[in-house]
């Protein structure tokens, strides 16, 4: 049965998810996108698909996915607007294969050309962008965001609401705490505690800046 689905975000990330759904539907139609949900967009429709205000969402038995890349904002929208009203799905590009030994939570988005190794345990509501590589035995909590071209080594442990900028490389066995933000093209070889921001300097060293909650 074709699932009716709403995409929360009518920005660039939401449109990327629309394209992901189009790719999923190529061989067999699995989803019918009935609208975007975005309170900040003035446009009435995008590519012929209606944009709804969150207060005027159609009351139907439908599914939802959130395309907001910021982990903190994504958590807020999912908890406030989605969880109690809609069912969640995992959207996985057809050319991304998930080994049987790896496990996914719900509400995850995995784009094209992502490699996921064995015994990976991914939480809920995570976004993994294209051309990323997830090493074996990695464990991640909820609301992880991985931008394009990121490499996470084997046996890493990733906390809640962590964002990896594009082109980041994380060595094997590294532990990263909750609420960390890793800058583009960073090289991480040491454990990071909670609430740390990593700023790349010529990809050789990093500096730590505590994030104020």
Image (cartoon, rainbow, N blue to C red):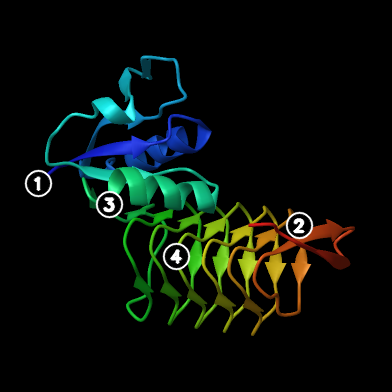
- The quadrant the C terminus occupies is bottom right
Sequence-wise first label, 3 or 2: 3
Quote the CA–CA distance across marks 2 and 4. Answer: 23 Å
**Mark 3 or mark 4: whose residue is earlier in sequence:** 3
Q: Residues within 10 Å of mark 2 (few under 14, many from 20)?
A: many
Residue at the front extreme of this rendering: 213
* Label 4 crowd bin: few (<14), some (14–19), many (20+), radius 10 Å: many
Task: Say which residue label 3 marks.
Answer: 83
- Residue at the disc numbered 2: 185
What residue sits right under mark 1 in the picture? 1
CA gap between label 4 and label 1 equals: 28 Å
Image side of residue 158 versus residue 108, left or right: right
Q: Which residue is nearer to you in this view: 22 or 120?
A: 120
Q: Residues within 10 Å of mark 1 (few under 14, many from 20)?
A: few
Q: How far apart are marks 3 and 2 (CA)?
A: 34 Å
> What is the x, y in percent for residue 128?
50, 56
Sequence-wise, the earlier of marks 1 and 3 is 1
Residue 109, position in %: x, y? 41, 53
- Give the CA separation, mark 1 to mark 2: 42 Å
Identify the residue at horizontal 44%, vertical 32% (top origin): 15
Task: Locate residue 32 relative to residue 43 in the image: left or right.
Answer: left
Element type at marker 4?
A: loop
């Amino acid at each position: 049965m074709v699932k009716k689905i709403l995409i929360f975000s009518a920005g660039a990330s939401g449109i990327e998810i629309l394209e992901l759904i189009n790719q999923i539907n190529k061989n067999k139609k699995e989803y019918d996108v009935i609208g975007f949900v975005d309170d900040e967009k003035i446009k009435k429709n995008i590519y012929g698909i209606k944009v709804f205000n969150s207060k005027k969402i159609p009351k139907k038995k439908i599914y939802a996915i959130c395309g907001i890349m910021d982990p903190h904002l994504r958590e807020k929208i999912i908890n406030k607007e989605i969880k109690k009203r809609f069912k969640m799905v995992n959207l996985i590009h057809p050319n991304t294969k998930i080994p049987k030994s790896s496990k996914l939570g719900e509400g995850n988005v995995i784009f094209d050309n992502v490699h996921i190794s064995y015994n990976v345990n991914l939480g809920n509501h995570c976004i993994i962008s294209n051309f990323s590589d997830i090493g074996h035995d990695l464990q991640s909590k909820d609301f992880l965001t991985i931008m394009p071209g990121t490499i996470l080594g084997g046996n890493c442990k990733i906390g809640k609401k962590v964002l990896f900028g594009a082109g980041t490389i994380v060595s094997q066995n590294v532990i990263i705490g909750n609420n960390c933000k890793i800058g583009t093209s960073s090289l991480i070889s040491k454990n990071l505690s909670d609430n740390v921001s990593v700023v790349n300097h010529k990809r050789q060293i990093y500096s730590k800046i505590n994030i104020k909650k």
